[in-house]
Image (tube, coloured by chain):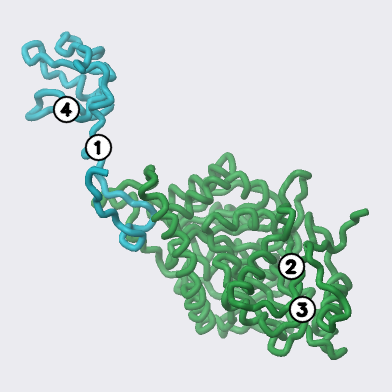
């Protein structure tokens, strides 16, 4: 029996999309500009119904493309509005240039992003290649394991984005979480409203008494300084994210950090992954622990800024680990999350553990307990010196030959 | 380099590339011209059509009357001359 953690919380049965739409209703942004795309459509569709029914006073702008959605969201934000949007995959890709604009202009936009595979070939199912493809854009990226996390992350992200002055995206795995119903806790409207507070921008274009130009050209002598500011803002955002998580825990009860550690204290073999597959991994770990295998999991929640020092420290005593990426980099080498994890380890002098990279689940390809158990079995052999760690990326559950 | 001005650092610059309003006035675009407008005070009727049409705010006005041309910012597009109904503005080649 699922019980609420917050004293005034209520348990509901909602999908990831429904939870994100509910969070948006309670946040009540000034402007939402959006365009539909599977599997994110429901978020803004449900939200636009709230607007039509007078349940939220948001100005909803139905634009003609995702590029326009981000453009309009940016415009609303610079005008001084709390602005949000939602999209996925090709829609997210279509707004790619505007993502960089939003970050460069340091706007606290919050996006509900449902992770879906990128074309070609066309595929509407869950993998993380869309947001992984924008990991250099300067947006804060927070990945959710389930509908509860999606809801909690959306609420925290409004505060994070405004404090860090960085646009923030909150994701769920497409269809797997976006469309799957779970028992989850929601909080009363007034408590969410109190937590997110009001948006108080220092400078905004509707402040006609203090006019300014935003988005002008910068030549060779200024551009680099502003890009440095953006990179520094990501570094500074780490503390902001933890402070807001602490405030969230004190008010609502659930604890969040850069990542979740599951049975890592004495782990000899570990998996690092992002999203819904973490849940499957925990179930496998429970079984392995009964057999005496010291398996653990690090489930990354905050991928940008990347918690390098912290993750290196928490992996230092592991004998063998595997990073499971739900996106491939087509780089001829390794996938995104692995690259960041290993760079973090090496920069921190952590060279003991053997680290392997697996790509799984592209285009919504199934990953189940047997696949993950096989990874742990192999890691166990590597840890015991009975097998070699792979020096190239490996693939799970795909027909190769 | 003629003079090494000390430029602000990343720590000193405002976030997001904000530029305070009105800096366009400091940027001289007059040197872009190849033809220049010449205004005749005698022929001018102060109808203000040139002032309304000028895309660069380069028709100088005071007390409801035209007083001259701002040659620091006029780019020589010729719209003022074309729109003037009284022949009070003629376009001449820039003397180099």
| Labels 2 & 3 near each other (Cβ < 8 A) | no
Residue depth check, mark 1 versus mark 2: number of the one nearer the observer: 1
Counting residues from the N terminus, which is met first, the one under dot 4 or under dot 1?
A: 1
Q: Position of residue B82 (x, y in %)?
A: 25, 12
Q: Is residue A301 left or right of residue A364?
A: left
Circle 2 packing at 10 Å, graded few (<14), some (14-19), many (20+), is some
Circle 4 packing at 10 Å, graded few (<14), some (14-19), many (20+), is some
How far apart are the alpha carbons under marks 1 and 2?
59 Å
State whether residue A226 is above or below residue A163.
Answer: above
Q: Is residue A53 left or right of residue A330?
A: left
Label annotation for residue A256: none
Q: SS for tag 1?
A: loop
Label annotation for residue A181: 2
- Label 3 in the same subunit as label 4: no
Q: Pointer 1 indicates a residue of which chain?
A: B
Q: Position of residue A384 (x, y in %)?
A: 84, 84
What residue is shown at x 20% (from left), y 20% (from top)?
A: B50
Q: Pointer 2 indicates a residue of which chain?
A: A
Q: SS for tag 4?
A: loop
How far apart are the alpha carbons under marks 2 and 4?
68 Å
How far apart are the alpha carbons under marks 3 and 4?
73 Å
Q: SS for tag 2?
A: strand
Tell me the residue that label 3 is attached to.
A320
Tell me the residue that label 1 is attached to.
B27
Q: Pointer 4 indicates a residue of which chain?
A: B
């Amino acid at each position: 029996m699922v019980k609420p953690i917050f004293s005034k919380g209520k348990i509901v049965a909602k999908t990831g999309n429904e939870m994100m739409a509910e969070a948006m209703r309670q946040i009540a942004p000034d402007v939402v500009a959006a365009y539909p795309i599977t599997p994110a459509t429901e978020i803004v569709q449900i939200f636009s119904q709230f607007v039509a029914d007078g349940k939220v006073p948001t100005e909803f702008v139905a634009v003609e493309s995702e590029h326009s959605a981000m453009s309009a969201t940016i415009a609303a934000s610079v005008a001084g509005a709390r602005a949000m949007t939602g999209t996925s995959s090709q829609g997210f890709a279509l707004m790619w240039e505007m993502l960089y604009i939003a970050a460069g202009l340091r706007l606290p936009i919050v996006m509900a992003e449902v992770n879906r595979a990128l074309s070609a070939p066309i595929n509407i199912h869950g993998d993380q290649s869309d947001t992984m493809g924008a990991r250099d854009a300067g947006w804060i990226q927070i990945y959710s394991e389930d509908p509860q996390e999606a809801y909690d992350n959306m609420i925290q992200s409004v505060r994070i984005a405004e404090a860090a002055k960085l646009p923030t995206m909150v994701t769920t795995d497409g269809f797997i979480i976006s469309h799957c119903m779970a028992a989850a806790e929601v909080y009363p409207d007034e408590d969410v409203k109190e937590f997110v507070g009001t948006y108080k921008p220092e400078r905004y274009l509707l402040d006609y008494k203090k006019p300014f130009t935003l988005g002008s050209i910068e030549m060779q002598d200024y551009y680099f300084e502003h890009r440095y500011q953006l990179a520094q803002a990501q570094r500074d955002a780490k503390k902001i994210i933890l402070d807001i998580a602490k405030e969230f825990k004190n008010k609502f009860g659930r604890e969040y950090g850069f990542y979740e550690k599951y049975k890592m204290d004495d782990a000899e073999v570990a998996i690092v992954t992002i999203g819904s597959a973490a849940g499957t991994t925990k179930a496998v770990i429970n079984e392995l622990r009964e057999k005496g295998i010291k398996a653990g999991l690090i489930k990354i929640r905050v991928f940008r800024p990347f918690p390098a020092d912290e993750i290196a420290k928490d992996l230092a005593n592991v004998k063998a680990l595997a990073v499971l990426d739900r996106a491939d980099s087509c780089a001829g080498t390794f996938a995104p999350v692995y690259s960041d994890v290993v760079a973090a380890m090496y920069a921190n002098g952590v060279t003991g553990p053997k680290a392997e990279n697996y790509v799984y689940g592209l285009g919504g390809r199934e990953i189940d307990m047997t696949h993950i158990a096989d990874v742990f079995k192999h890691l166990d052999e590597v840890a015991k010196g009975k097998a070699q760690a792979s020096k190239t990326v490996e693939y799970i559950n795909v027909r190769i030959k | 380099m003629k003079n090494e001005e000390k430029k602000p650092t990343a720590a000193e610059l405002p976030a997001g590339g904000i530029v305070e309003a009105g800096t366009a006035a400091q940027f001289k675009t007059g040197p872009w011209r190849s033809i220049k407008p010449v205004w005749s005070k005698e022929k001018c009727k102060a109808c203000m059509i040139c002032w309304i049409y000028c895309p660069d705010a380069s028709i100088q006005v005071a007390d409801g009357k035209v007083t001259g041309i701002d040659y620091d910012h006029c780019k020589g597009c010729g719209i003022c001359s074309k729109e003037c109904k009284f022949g009070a503005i003629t376009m001449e080649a820039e003397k180099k």
